[in-house]
Image: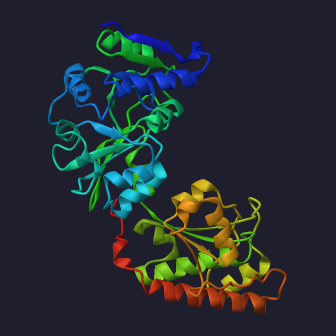
Amino acid sequence: MSTVFIDLNQTEDVRDVIHRAVEALSSGKIIAFQTETVYGLAASALQPAAVDRLWEIKGRDPKKPFALAVKSYEEALDYIPNMMPTAKRLARRCWPGPVTLVMDDHPQSVVHQLDAAVVRSTVPQGTIGLRVPDDEVALAILRLCAGPIVLTSANRSGQPAAMTGQEVMDQLDGDVDLVIDGGPTRYQGPSTVVKVGEDVNILREGVVKESVIRELTDFVALVVCTGNTCRSPMAEAIMKMEFAKHLGCGLDEIASHGVTILSAGIAAMPGAPAAGQSVEVMRQMGVDISSHASQPVTQRLAKCSDVIFTLTNGHRQAIVSQWPELESTVRTLRPDGGDIADPIGSPVSVYQTCAQQIRQCLEQWAQAIDFQQFKKRTS
């Protein structure tokens, strides 16, 4: 068999190459393409004969399953309908990106709608590995495919992973149908493989280090106002006080329990200090926020948050209208959906009233939190 080699740098229209790749996968062929980590060897999960060929080409131990590449975090929920909160955090924060998540299989997973041979190749021991590569061409191929892609590194088992299209050809010329060469991969190393259940276990440390993975499992709460200089800095500090009280730790120890609390503003300019009145009120409550620096609400910050509290309903509507998929994450700090008025320009007494209102709302919210989930890290 002759392998077709396409150099993207010599291609006038990448879209033609993408459509050619999708057509090849749909017809049961094996292709190789660039990801951000190493070159991947791919077969359509809807083509069981092609998946069988992957085993032959790789010479892989049958006990080592292949991962499934999916389009997005949202699609991954169809494969793991009972995804645990820690796994959801890692998926939201790492995908698209160089992390493969291994999770327990679920009987209602759509993977069981695939051919039995494909299920044996991807879910042989009650777990399934999912990946969303961070590469424009790879993602474009995934988006146009009817189903997921069975993905493995483009090399023979025991041989070095390929970092360029030419390296794929050096090992697999004649065995694969199509190689798309996009040049050297971005990270020049494998994805990090993480098993997520009750605990987080690193099965293979790749380009994302274990320490970073641990940080990415943190519970993140974000408080949002307009300029991130008056209300939300106070709310951030008060929320930290509330967590410290329930966890029995100091404010500087919250992170050791896997908790991150932040604030931001819908119309904030980066780097502005907290209002003097906010600093004074929080000083009276025993917290120093004089080093606060404002930041705007970004897509990355919003999507990384487990819960987003807004000081007004207008702030909530602004976030949801921009990122509708976050609707279930965003709530007003006041349980009744009302607003906490902006004290900007007012005397300290008005800021004190605002802070007390914020505190009452957070104390009420804390009553529904199981703080036992935030176990102190031992390493």
Residue at the extreme top of the image, as rendered: 2
Question: Which one is in front, 94 or 55?
Answer: 55
Is 345 rendered above or below residue 66? below
Can residue 138 be seen here? The reply is yes
Left of 46 or right of it: where is 298? right
Residue ID at (25%, 46%)? 113
Can residue 285 be seen here? The reply is no
Residue at the extreme right of the image, as rendered: 345
Residue 51 in percent (x, y) is at 25, 29
Residue 17 in percent (x, y) is at 51, 21
Left of 175 or right of it: where is 256? right
Residue 90 in percent (x, y) is at 41, 54
The quadrant of the picture occupied by the N terminus is top left
Question: Which one is in front, 357 or 10?
Answer: 10
Is 42 rendered above or below residue 252? above
> Which image quarter: residue 61?
top left
> Which image quarter: residue 285?
bottom right
Residue 5 in percent (x, y) is at 44, 11
Question: Which one is in front, 272 or 104?
Answer: 104
Could you tell me how many numbered marks the image carries? 0
Residue ID at (47%, 71%)? 254
Residue ID at (32%, 16%)? 176
Residue ID at (70%, 92%)? 353
Is 88 rendered above or below residue 279? above
Is 70 rendered above or below residue 58? below
The quadrant of the picture occupied by the C terminus is bottom left
Left of 8 or right of it: where is 207? left
